[in-house]
Image: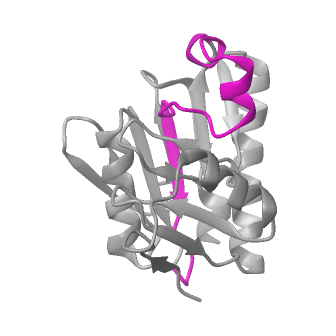
Amino acid sequence: MTAYTINFNSVFEMTDEQFYQLCRANPEVKFERNTKGELIIMPPTGGETGKRNASLTARFVIWNEQSKLGVVFDSSTCFKLPTGTERSPDVAWIRQDRWDALTPEQKEKFPPIAPDFVLELLSPSDRLNDVQAKLKEYIDSGVKLGWLIDPQTQRVEIHRPNGATEILEKPATLSDEIVLPGFVLNLEFLWD
C-alpha cells in the first residue's frame, strides 16, 4: 500500500488544533503533514514490518530504562517539528532535559519539538526517496541523528546535520556515542 498525499489548501487551511482533532477522531488512521500543509495518509504496516518495529522500539526502551537519559517514543507519536510539519518516526528519542522543558499540555498533544534521534524502518510499501526526504526534513528541523534501515537491501543510511549521509552495507551493529551514549543496536535479527 502507498501513502497518499492530499492538498486541501485551496479549500481551507487546517490549523494545528484541527489537525490534532482530526487525528483524535480517526485513531485507526495514521496522518502526517508536510511543509506545504498537505495531509499524508499513511498505510498500516504488515506483520513483518510491525514485528521489526516492535523489536527496534523495545531495544531503545530497554537501553533508555537503564541509562535514564531521555524518553523513547513509538511510531504512533506525532511531533510538531519547527519547520511546521507533523511527523511520526518509527522510533524517536529525546534527551530528558529537553523533554522536561515542555509544558504538560505540549507533552499531551503533538510535542512541538524535534527529537534528538529518529529511526525510520523502510517497509515494502515505502518509496525510498520519500523516506530519504523525510530524514532530510527531520535533520533540517533540528534532529541530531537519523537512521534509515532497509531490511530488504540490508542497508543503513545514517543522516547527520552536517549534510553527509553515511551508507553502511549489512552492518552488524549501529551506535553513536554523542547522541545515544552507551546504546548499541545489534542488527543481526533484521538481516536473518
Q: Residue 122 appears at what percent x and percent y?
A: 51, 70
Q: Residue 140 appears at what percent x and percent y?
A: 29, 41
In which image quadrant can residue 141 be found?
Answer: top left
Q: Which residues, given as a range, are shown in magenta?
A: 97-126
**Residue at 80% from the left image edge and 62% from the top image edge:** 25
Quarter of the image where the C terminus is located: bottom right
Return the residue nearer the eye: 156 or 28: 28
Q: Residue 90 appears at what percent x and percent y?
A: 61, 55
**Residue at 59% from the left image edge and 41% from the top image edge:** 92
> Can residue 38 be found in the magenta stretch?
no
In which image quadrant can residue 102 be found?
Answer: top right
Quarter of the image where the N terminus is located: bottom right
Return the residue nearer the eye: 171 or 135: 135
> Can residue 101 be found in the magenta stretch?
yes
Could you tell whether 180 is left or right of 83 in the image?
Answer: right
Return the residue nearer the eye: 164 or 151: 164
Could you tell whether 134 is left or right of 103 in the image?
Answer: left
Q: Is residue 139 above or below residue 18?
A: above
Q: Is residue 120 above or below residue 68?
A: below
Q: Is residue 73 above or below residue 85?
A: above
In which image quadrant can residue 178 be found?
Answer: top left
**Residue at 43% from the left image edge and 50% from the top image edge:** 85
Q: Is residue 14 above or below residue 107?
A: below
Could you tell whether 64 is left or right of 92 in the image?
Answer: right
